[in-house]
Image (cartoon, rainbow, N blue to C red):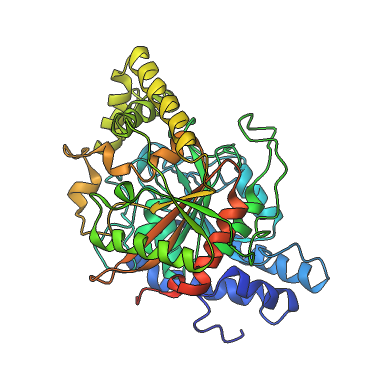
Amino acid sequence: MKNLKNMHYQTISELAPRIESGEISPVDLTKAQLKRIKDLDPQLRSYATVTEDLAIEQAERAKKEIANGLYRGKLHGIPIAVKDLCNTAGIRTMGGSAVFAHNVPNHNATVVNKLNEAGSVLLGKLNMTEGAMGGYHPDFQIPENPWRATYWSGASSSGSGSATAAGLAYATLGSDTGGSIRHPAAVCGTVGLKPTWGRVSRYGVMDLAPSLDHVGPLTRSAKDAGIMLEAISGHDSKDSTSLPQHVPDMLSNVGKNLKGIKIGWDEEYATTGVEPSFASAVLHATTVMESLGAELVHIKMPDGMRDAMAAWPVICASEAFTAHKDTFPARASEYGPFFRQWLENGSGYSSSDYADAHRLRIEFVGALRLSMRNVDVLLGPSTGKTAYPVSHDVLYGPIPSDRNPWDSRFTVPFDFSGLPTISLPSGLDDNGMPTSIQFAGHHLAEPLLVGIGTAFESVTKFHKLHPTI
């Protein structure tokens, strides 16, 4: 096996041409990743299931295809992993819940099929919070943040953030209903790309709240996020909510001059009530973007935002209760304290409560569009604070009494609106933990976000910072 020491933090963009040329074997790369998982994941607990035999089989197939001139593209032979709410035929899909501990689907999620078609290698399924909400089931392990043990690794795509940051996969899939791609990306120091709602099919992906759920990649560069997103995007006849628009070249804006790009900036929104490290990171990003030729445009985020954020738990819990109707309340005792309480909350909301929350949502989305009407993207933090110490008692539930919807004001607006966002590493705080910024774009603006992200990375190199494990 070729010496692949220190290859675990390479990007897809760096590896792909070397795989295509035959310099690196997908089999060797996969075996190196499996060994790293075996060595480090007992400590990090990012994987729910490691699919070693399948990964070797897929890697050997990729090697033969590439040798025969049948190169499928940049993901061919690349070892990746997916969040354990994406159905995988013949492989358990648990969604972080003991209720589904023995659930073995007979079909793949569309995103898994698309990654297979791209020639990627599936290393396994990644740990997550129960039901993709905020807390874990007591029967399941909690992933560690690779930057520091016992620190929050983000929810709900915890394993996706941890594995990507730790070099245990070259890219992962997460899902985002209220911030579950962006929180793990932010606190683990990775890129997270939440696509436009409907850009990616949700067929075969366990629901939390269908009107809010998004599926997208966590990677170690903006270009890699674009490569992953392009592979999994597109209309799907099995998901009527998937968008019919043609899937563009997600890297089409990479390398383009940012002159003339207008960046919306509400300093009060972006820095008030935010940890100083995150506020400083976002302020620094404004300077970086202006140096790249972009124009900073001062805007005002919508009034009534606090009321709109308070509508999110009503919508999410109500839709979650409906999504789990086959197992809750019939098997309520099998759910963990956190998610069981979330479903109980959902069962208690009336149709009037849901309608009022939905009205607040659509009114806010309209106001957000007005706020962004004269800009190309909006800049702010990915979340309000860096990773912090957590205990099992808190993360297993019940729901903390001080849980505040306002804490999600940097993520929920773009789940409500379905607008795409990209989260980017922006340095380390005084405690040595990652900080992150976020650009939000208009409907189907992912190529622009990838281009902006790549431009930011080209002059900052924060995405090259990695934890010492």
Q: Horizontally, is 433 left or right of 99 in the view?
A: left
Q: Position of residue 260 (x, y in %)?
A: 58, 57
Picture quarter containing residue 323?
top left
Q: Which residue lies at the image location 29% right of the left edge and 58% below the top edge?
A: 279
- Is 336 above or below relative to 275? above
| Residue 435 vs residue 41, the one in the foreground | 435
For the residue pair 67 and 187, the one nearer the viewer reads as 187
Residue 123 visible in the snapshot: no
Q: How far across and down, in percent of the image, does residue 221 sit?
A: 52, 66
Instruction: Give left or right: position of 417 versus 346.
Output: right
Res. 67 visible in picture: yes
Which residue is at 57% across, 58% downward? 450
| Number of numbered discs | 0
Give the residue displayed 23% in from the left and 71% down from the top: 430
Residue located 70% across and 55% down the image? 249
Can you give x and y, in whole percent of width and height, for residue 65 in the image? 78, 67
Pick the quarter of the image with the N terminus. bottom right
| Picture layout, residue 348 above or below residue 440 | above
